[in-house]
Amino acid sequence: MRILPLLVLLAAPAAAEDLLQVKFAKSDPALSADPANSFWRGVTPILATRNNLGVETPNHRTEIRARWTKSNLYVLFTCPYEELYLLPNPSTTTETNKLWEHDVAEIFIGADFDHINRYREVQVSPQGEWVDLDIDSNNMGNTGALKWSSNMKTKARIDEKAKVWYGEFQIPLTSITDKAVKPGTKMRGNFYRFQGPPPNRKSVAWVQTGRANNHTPEKFAPIQFVK
């Protein structure tokens, strides 16, 4: 099996044999939404530059960094943009349904290799709005998906001068799996982003699914938690 550590830049879609390694951190930091923060020092991002069909999305080269601690998975998105498509009157204290219809960074992650249709979906917007969902891709009409709560924390900020926004997640590991997470634990996942207003909406995916729908768990790549 070919191993791709998180310290390697990935511009091409991950193949089935690829393995993404996420490094351990001893302590939980305060969220900063800042890749220059000491917590993220030395963590080189993986890249998302293409849409689900494998077509390059210019000017939207998305960087994704990940680390884990005893209690949480941390993911930081760095998102260049051309034009923001935001909701008016954003709320960061309540869940925002259908947030994906505007600008978001998304994580799909699951720990059940026997039932890969079951996984979690979490999102954050440039304004710090969020949504978390318990997904069964075989039953996308499940009204209980939105009722599920991960108890995650998010932080976002916009650098208007540089035309980049940043979104950071702190996701409790117990919200992904009821098993103990330790070095060697494997999960499956993908990272996505939607950007800009219609009709010129842009998207990128770390692993290309081959169709417009992000909910294609058979294309998710393995993720391994390591020291």
Image: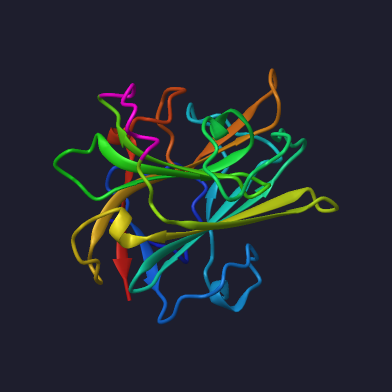
Residue 126 at what x, y percent from top left?
Answer: 67, 46
Residue 68 at what x, y percent from top left?
Answer: 39, 68
Q: Is residue 54 visible?
A: yes
Q: Is residue 15 visible?
A: no
Q: In which quarter of the image is residue 227?
A: bottom left
Q: Which residue is depicted at the point 58% across and 28% down?
A: 101
Task: Using the image as rendered, state which of residue 167 and residue 205 is in the foreground.
Answer: 167
Residue 52 at what x, y percent from top left?
Answer: 48, 30
Residue furthest to the top in view is 199
Count how many numbered circles sit on residues in the image.
0
Q: Which residue is depicted at the point 72% across and 41% down?
A: 81
Q: Up-down: is 33 above or below 38?
A: above
Q: Quadrant of the N terminus?
A: bottom left
Residue furthest to the right in view is 161
Check the image and tell me how it is coloured. rainbow
Residue 161 horizontal side relative to residue 147, left or right: right
Residue 105 horizontal side relative to residue 141, left or right: right
Task: Using the image as rendered, state which of residue 202 and residue 120 is in the foreground.
Answer: 120
**What predominant SS class does the magenta segment belong to?**
loop
Residue 138 at what x, y percent from top left?
Answer: 25, 25
> Which region shows up in magenta?
139-147
Magenta stretch: residue 97 in it? no
Residue 43 horizontal side relative to residue 187, left or right: right
Q: In which quarter of the image is residue 58?
A: top right
